[in-house]
Image (spheres, helix red, strand yellow):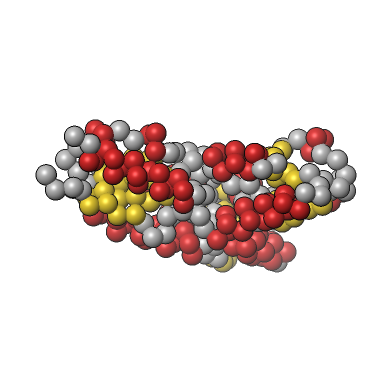
Amino acid sequence: MTAPEIRVAKTAGFCPGVKNAIETARRLALSGKKRVFTYGPLIHNRQVIAELEQEGIKSVSDLSLLAKGDIIIIRAHGITPEQETGLHALGLEVADATCPLVKKAQSAISCCAAQGYETVIVGDSGHAEVIGLMGYTQGRGHVISSSDEAAELPRMKKAHIVSQTTQEEAVFKAAAEAVRQHCGESLVSDTICQPTKERQQEVLELASWADVMVVVGDRHSANTARLADICARLCRETLLIEDEAGLAKENFENAGRIAVTAGASTPDQLIEKVVARIRTLVHAS
């Protein structure tokens, strides 16, 4: 029997924003001069967070545990302006590891809010990034996850429509069009980041080709979940796993074509372990 063909997405793994956040944290920790903390999980990947803790970089939500002069790193997803002000007020050394593309979205929201626009964010209401973005709306923000939810919005004179940076492009466009029906004047800012668009475009092609599609990433990662959703529409056998332990031989029975992708917070070494595990399973007698 011919061995299955395995393709790994070129866009799989860390995005530039995640890489920057991790490099920032490790650089500060290596100085060894001060205690280093992150304000909440730096990224959405438990394996990476565990590695950082072993290196002395701990995630905290209770700021009372910190002392004046400690280093606090703002997570890649960003925080609200009020939270950032609070960090400085405590006398902490603040290092901002917010993804530059998230900061671009924050800036766009802040600018339009100052001009009297209400903000509609197309995203996940409980996600750290969206919570941070809401802080820039001057108290005039709304969050919807789909075009269907636009019907629940109040009538607005001026609406600025933006997206969580890892949103699916088709969902954002449909939602933005639906929001337009609820406002007199509308302005749309496509704040989906380019790495997300490229990653999602690639999985459309891979999932259409594959008999089995494997998506690797933390289950708390929004962008990973969206990748899995996109894949599942095109490939019936779509697996969402956190690591290689989530795979079994029966997952690949009669599979001639196997594709692997991963979320933006998934390290290369984890992807490599998954691919190695797949090769072992499909070659097992």
- The reply to whether residue 156 is visible in this rendering is no
Which of 27/179 is in front? 27
**Residue 257, image x, y percentages:** 22, 50
Q: Is residue 127 left or right of residue 29?
A: left
Place residue 188 in its image quadrant.
bottom right
Q: Is residue 210 left or right of residue 20?
A: left
Residue at 57% across, 57% down: 19
Residue displayed at 59% across by 47% down: 43
Looking at the rendered image, the quarter that the C terminus falls into is top left
Left/right placement of residue 201 relative to residue 258 reads right
Query: What residue is drawn where x is 18% and y is 47%?
Result: 3
Q: Which quadrant holds residue 283?
A: top left
The percent position of residue 82, horizontal first and vertical second, equals 77, 50
In this rendering, position of residue 281 left or right of residue 21: left
Which residue lies at the image location 36% right of the left edge and 56% below the top edge?
A: 9
The quarter of the picture where residue 254 lies is top left
The quarter in which the N terminus is drawn is top left
> Is 196 in front, or is 18?
18
> Which is nearer the eye, 79 or 35?
35
Residue 190 image offset from top left, x and y in percent: 52, 64
How many numbered discs? 0
Q: Is residue 69 shown to the viewer in this render?
A: yes
Image vertical order of residue 138 relative to residue 248, above or below: below
Relative depth, front residue between 184 and 281 = 281
Query: Residue 162 at what x, y percent from top left?
Result: 56, 59
